[in-house]
Amino acid sequence: MAAPVVFPRSRTGSGSAQYDAEGRELVADVREDEEQNVKLQETIELLLAAGYFRARIKGLSPFDKVVGGMTWCITTCNFDVDVDLLFQENSTIGQKIALTEKIVAVLPRMKCPHRIEPHQIQGLDFIHIYPVVQWLVKRAIETREEMGDQIRSFSVWQFNKHHKTPQDVEFAEQQPVSVSSVEKIKDVYRPQRKYRRAETHRLKDEESRIQSTLLEYGRRHGASTLSKADKESEKGNKKGPLSPGRAGGEGAEDLEEMRKIEEKKIQSLMKGLAAMDTEQGRIAASMVGSIVGLQSDEIQQIASEYAGRQSELQLGDGTERLSSSQQHQRTVTSLNRQMKNYEKRREKILGDHSELQQSYQQAESQLQEVKTLAERINSEMNNLEALETDENKEVLLVLRGLVAKNENLKKQEQEFRAQCKEEMAKLKQQISDLKESAGQGGGELSERDQLIAKQFQADQEKLQKIRLLLARKNREISQLQRKIDDIPSRAELTQYQRRFVELYNQVNNTHRETKQFYTLYNTLDDTKLYLEKEITLLNSIHDNFQQAMSSPSSTQQFLKQFEQMVEGIKVTKASLEKRKLEEKVKRDELNDNYLDLIDKQRLYFKTVKEFQEECRKNENLLKKLERKA
């Protein structure tokens, strides 16, 4: 039966091929989790459906595919991740942890509803990775749909900057002709003045001036308006029911009278108009030159004639002008007086406004400080609630009680200080009153001072005791806080265990590789030594062969030496064979011990899992008992 491993998930990065002492490759027996494999395939299919086709590459590990896909989705959603996956595949454990921590730090900013830890991504826990990848893919598709129109319009704009379609070329060719035609039509149908009024200063009200201007261009505004009103009134009279008496007749008579009045008004305005030619009213260039070329003497003469005629007109209407000038002077005086009053009111309002603005700014700054304090308190409360677990719940309850007691003591201290300040102020006032009064009852005053001093000393000692008690409570609270911080939570312990196991695996792999390198080096060194001995032996045989063959006696001696060397080689080979057998026996014993340890490990993990299950059942039963109680 296959032996289980601690974390039955595929690992990449530092896993090289492992060999035994004889150089044969060892194949690790790893238990595959079917649910994890199913989630892995679903995750890769999601990334492919979203458009991350790099997940099809078979040479990449599942970690590189998943982390690369998550980074691609986050970047597609317009969020920055400081990760470079192009040239850092098959990373080490430290690099993997850094990558996963950066990704996990970005997910809360994206408001991801699913929570995930770095060790879950690094450990390829696809049961927890799949919901996060699913949400990221959905968010990436939504972002691409939102940005699709903007990207399309931007691409069209970039295309139009450097290229043109046949429709654009045709429009550019026809545009000058169309613009000239429109300009000609505007020139033909522009308003033309048909009449001119000689005395425009007699028109006092604005409505008369508007009607006169419209009549000069051949438009009868009042008549057309009346005609429309007449039509609407006639339609209303036809559709509506017949009113009793003479109501319908009176309405028609009123409309007729209004029409006659408007016609008379238009006729009176038309009397003051004179027909003009198309060239009339235009000042020629020669006339402008004559006006500009007038001499200064002629201009002064014309101005003096105008002043004389103006004085004659003023003499004729003296009485009327006098009364109007007095009235104007009074109006100006009253207006000046009102302006001064308004200026005073304005200065007063500005002063009040500046004061209110300062008070508003102060209140706003105080409100901002209160808001920041409230946010900081809420964040600290949330941190405390996040730290609360079943293990430290009782300790936190005790800590909350101590904190509430501490706050109550602080409040009592503040109230007591305020009370002491009030009493001290009262006592100082009494002392000042007594000093100002006459010097009667000196003995009684000194006794009262002694009584006040004794009371003040007692209150001061009481305050010192309260301060010492408060300091003691603060020390106890700080000690409890340090104890709580020293106790790691279950999640931290799990993460520590994973990290230590990963570190142990990495160190074990490195140690195994180093051991294999040492074994290989020693083997090659022994091989080299034996080859050198063999080469030396062959060289000596080759050098002495001719000399040994020169005489029969030397030949016999050479053969005897040769036989001794062969015997020595056989002895050495026998010793090496014996050593090899001993090493094989040791290897078999170690392999048996290893299999026993694997069985014990399997039993240990099975027992731990059963123990955890029983603990969970026990906790559920205890909760049910507490609810029933």
Image (cartoon, helix red, strand yellow):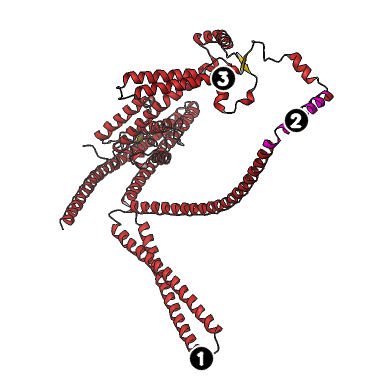
- Specify whether residue 575 is in view: no
Q: Earlier in the sequence, mark 2 or mark 1?
A: 2
In this view of the protein, which residue sits in the foreground, 352 or 421? 352
Q: Secondary structure at mark 2?
A: helix
Q: In whole angstroms, how far apart are the C-alphas of marks 3 and 2?
A: 30 Å
Q: In whole angstroms, how far apart are the C-alphas of marks 2 and 1?
A: 103 Å
> Do labels 2 and 1 touch, CB within 8 Å?
no
588 with respect to 212 (left or right): left
| Crowd class of label 3 (few under 14; some 14 to 19; many from 20; radius 10 Å) | few
The residue identified by callout 1 is 441
The residue identified by callout 3 is 268
Q: How many numbered marks have been drawn onto this rendered protein structure?
A: 3
Q: Earlier in the sequence, mark 3 or mark 2?
A: 3
Answer with the quarter of the image where residue 236 lies. top left
| Crowd class of label 2 (few under 14; some 14 to 19; many from 20; radius 10 Å) | few
In this view of the protein, which residue sits in the foreground, 262 or 303? 262
Residue pictured at 66% horizontal, 39% vertical: 323
Residue 606 lies in magenta, yes or no?
Answer: no
Q: Earlier in the sequence, mark 1 or mark 3?
A: 3
Relative to 567, say whether 618 is above or below. below
The residue identified by callout 2 is 312
Main secondary-structure element of the magenta-colored stretch:
helix
- Give the residues drawn in magenta, as a range: 298-320
- Specify whether residue 586 is in view: yes
Answer with the quarter of the image where residue 143 lies. top left
Residue 313 lies in magenta, yes or no?
Answer: yes
Residue 507, x across and y down, in percent: 39, 43
Q: Secondary structure at mark 1?
A: loop
Q: Nearer the viewer, mark 1 or mark 3?
A: 3
